Image (cartoon, helix red, strand yellow):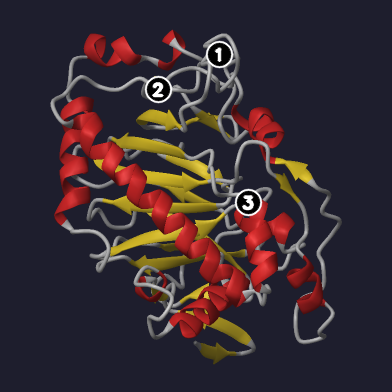
Amino acid sequence: MAETTGIKVASNLPIISIAPWLNGADAPGRLSTAAALHAACLEFGFFYLDISSFVDPEEPEELAKLAREFFSLPQEEKDKIWLGHQDHARGYARLKENVTNGKADNHEAIDLYRPVEQPDKTKPLWGENQWPTLPQFREKYEVWIHKMKVLGMAVMEAMSVGLGMRPDEWDQLRTQVDDSFWVMRIIGYPPLPNDEDGFSCGAHKDYGCLTFLWADPTRNALQVFLPEPFVAVENPGHAPVEEGIERGAWISADPISGCVVCNIGEMWEIWTQGLYKSTLHRVIHRGSNYRFVSIPFFFEPNFNAVVAPLPAAKRLQQDDSQKKPAGTYSPTVYGDFLLKKVGGNFAQGKGKYD
């Protein structure tokens, strides 16, 4: 990272191998990985995770192929699993059905959540997942879900070490995420018209714990907002001051083979009392390919987890070399927080991130 007239310059987001935390407790490199995660969360809230030792690169490519098959079906076929048939959260969301910041998002998606006991589609988030009937669709995606849950626990443990948590403190935090109320979206983005002033997905922060995003090789679609003092070297002429957003620069987080893009959600802001920040991001797809596919997996706390500032974060903030708390962070029951965000949002005509 270079210095230019007092401004830190970020040429790209960090790439961190998570292999040491997936290869057993005696694997070398665990401490350096934990330190790298801590630094990335302090500075960016976004980074690449190298998972090439954990996932065959052909596996997510097969998932994208299946997604394109589904999105290419006639509308009436896709509508058979429309989210309105369940709890208005689980199932197929039509093109422009979701809204962010008052504008329709130019994408369609399948939304899946952790299965619940005694499902009831009249209760927000408590319905049943709806799967396409395409051969092997559900089977292959369920394998991916399992791997992302394993990845989530590994990253959480590594982050606990990076934050300076004691083993007993990690044991306590683990009980808040060991039955993750995960979410997965399978998203198809047709190109935006050149005169379109909307977004494929508008600027927002993720509100959970960790997001693992695999995307096809489309470039310049996913964009991450870096507030000053960070400016992107590869895009220095595009640092707009947007209404309601602080001064800074949007940089592209293009896919890297063997990696997923990872970002932290708002629960990490509470856990760290503002030491880590959830970062704004958006999607603007104007490419020539008909449909850009991305598969974000959201590794979230348990539904009933009480998320509160961690003692390790408080200890760090007593050190003058660390940031001071940016505000008051009250304990939050994750399920209640989630329900306020997405419970029945489509039925009410609201957006997921409004």
Question: Could you tell which of marks 2 and 3 lies nearer the N-terminus?
Answer: 2
Please state the horizontal and vertical placement of residue 41, each as a whole percent of the image: 58, 69
Q: Secondary structure at mark 2?
A: loop
Residue at horizontal 49 percent and vertical 40 percent from the top: 182
> In which quadrant of the rendered view does residue 50 lie?
bottom left
- Badge 3: residue crowd in 10 Å (few <14, some 14–19, many ≥20): few
Q: Which residue is mark 3?
A: 175
Residue at horizontal 58 percent and vertical 49 percent from the top: 177
106 lies left or right of 338: left
User: What kind of residue is marked 2?
Assistant: Asn
Please state the horizontal and vertical placement of residue 7, each as a whole percent of the image: 61, 83
Above or below, 138 against 31 in this view is: above
User: What kind of residue is marked 3?
Assistant: Thr
Q: Which residue is mark 2?
A: 129
Mark whose residue sits in front, 2 or 3:
3
Above or below, 214 against 334 in this view is: below
- Badge 1: residue crowd in 10 Å (few <14, some 14–19, many ≥20): few
Residue at horizontal 25 percent and vertical 9 percent from the top: 76
Above or below, 166 against 66 in this view is: below
